[in-house]
Image (cartoon, grey):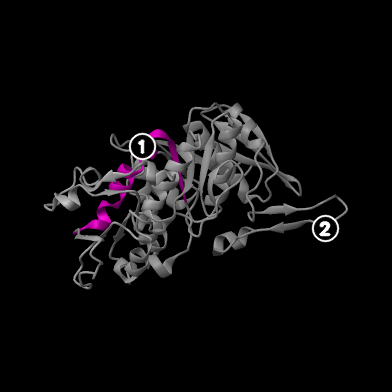
């Protein structure tokens, strides 16, 4: 039995609290065993939700949902699509504004999984995968069973299920959160892309902690300009229930974001971090300061100072830029209540994620081979 089948509920229960009353009792009392916006994931007895997209409509793919034997098709009318021609055994209902309801519907159907988890969202142009991956590792090393969701896949522990998107669609996000909660996770660390924030793919997720690694030129084909790109990233920190925001104030956008967060009574507590060169003055508002203590073929060292004490981290991660990722990761662990010493010890046990400055070397006599996924201009310049 799947997660969805255990959570079957009536349409009336699912849409409780929305404006949808369902005059037809056959629709109102219909029980669905699953919900999805992806026709390829549609199952017998489930509901396929066809929403309006940027360049197409979910109804373009309704045939696959019909073939799967769904119990009902809900669609979002937008003037560009006609009412679907459905078999008599499949119910159909038009739901205005369905796209805006997805987060709440998925949260309700899957049993409010993010309320049962301490969810951390990591955003930024570069470093999301590495930072999220090592935080999940570190939390597990600290005795907190942790799940990960992002470019590398999703799951609890080292065996991750593959994923095609950094942040999947809204319904799938909640499905995965429920699966990880059922697997015993207490924390989930997830990458949150700018596309996901712009498209409301994390709607309904209760984030406890949010973190910014950095911001540089990327995805302008989608966002149009840097201002729109930056604003999409900022959405993670406002209106998502975040209690603590870990922000890299060594980054220009990070400083702007910190200024927006600092001192507001209705926004997250700010935990600012900055990586500085030896003997350089850190930003005045940096609460956790990192200094690179040597970069070698077998790893790097980072010295931490600031409001949380002092500690030195020895890490097997390669590249000076990973000092910044480790710094943000340490800030996230501090936000979750761990002291700096324990955080540094746990981070010292972490290994690089696959394909992220990953060292391939069988013995000292062989050449050093490093595999890295760098693709943005800033990442390529640092790799």
Coordinates of residue 214 in the picture (x, y in percent):
49, 51
Q: Nearer the viewer, residue 146 or 345?
A: 146
Above or below: residue 54 compared with residue 271: below
Element type where label 1 sits in the image = loop
Question: Mark 1, residues whose alpha carbon is within 10 Å: few (<14), some, or many (≥20)?
Answer: many
Q: Decide if residue 256 is on the left or right side of residue 280.
A: left
For residue 302, which numbered disc appears in the image? none
Coordinates of residue 346 in the picture (x, y in percent):
62, 33
Q: Nearer the viewer, residue 140 or 254?
A: 140
Write down the region rendered in magenta. 96-123
Coordinates of residue 33 in the picture (x, y in percent):
34, 48
Task: Say whether residue 272 is visible.
Answer: no
Please report whichever mark, 2 or 1, sits nearer to the chain's N-terminal start.
1
Residue picked out by circle 1:
268
Residue picked out by circle 2:
367
Residue shown at 28% from the left, 34% from the top: 265
Q: Residue furthest right?
A: 365
Question: Mark 2, residues whose alpha carbon is within 10 Å: few (<14), some, or many (≥20)?
Answer: few
């Amino acid at each position: 039995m799947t997660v969805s089948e255990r959570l079957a509920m009536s349409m009336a229960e699912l849409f409780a609290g929305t404006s949808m009353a369902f005059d037809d009792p056959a629709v109102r009392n219909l029980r669905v065993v699953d919900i999805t916006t992806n026709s390829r994931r549609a199952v017998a007895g489930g509901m396929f939700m066809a929403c309006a997209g940027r360049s197409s409509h979910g109804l373009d793919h309704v045939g696959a949902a019909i073939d799967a034997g769904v119990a009902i098709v809900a669609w979002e009318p937008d003037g560009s699509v006609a009412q679907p021609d459905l078999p008599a055994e499949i119910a159909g209902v038009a739901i205005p504004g369905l796209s805006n309801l997805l987060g709440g519907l998925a949260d309700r159907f899957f049993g409010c999984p993010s309320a049962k988890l301490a969810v951390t969202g990591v955003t930024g142009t570069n470093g999301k995968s590495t930072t999220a991956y090592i935080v999940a590792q570190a939390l597990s090393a600290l005795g907190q069973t942790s799940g990960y969701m992002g470019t590398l896949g999703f799951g609890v522990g080292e065996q991750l299920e593959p994923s095609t998107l950094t942040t999947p669609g809204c319904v799938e996000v909640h499905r995965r959160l429920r699966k990880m909660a059922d697997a015993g996770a207490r924390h989930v660390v997830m990458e949150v892309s700018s596309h996901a924030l712009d498209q409301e793919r994390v709607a309904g997720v209760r984030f406890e902690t949010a973190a910014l690694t950095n911001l540089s030129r990327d995805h302008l084909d989608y966002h149009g300009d840097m201002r729109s790109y930056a604003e999409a990233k900022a959405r993670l920190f406002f209106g998502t229930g975040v209690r603590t925001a870990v922000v890299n104030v060594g980054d220009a956008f990070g400083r702007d974001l910190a200024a927006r967060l600092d001192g507001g009574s209705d926004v997250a507590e700010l935990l600012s971090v900055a990586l500085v060169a030896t003997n350089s003055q850190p930003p005045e508002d940096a609460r956790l300061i990192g200094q690179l203590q040597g970069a070698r073929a077998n790893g790097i060292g980072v010295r931490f100072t600031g409001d949380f004490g002092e500690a030195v981290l020895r890490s097997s991660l390669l590249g000076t830029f990973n000092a910044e990722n480790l710094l943000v990761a340490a800030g996230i662990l501090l936000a979750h209540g761990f002291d700096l010493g324990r955080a540094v010890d746990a981070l010292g046990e972490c290994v690089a994620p696959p394909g992220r400055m990953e060292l391939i070397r069988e013995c000292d006599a062989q050449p050093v081979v490093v595999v890295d996924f760098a693709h943005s201009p800033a990442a390529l310049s640092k790799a």
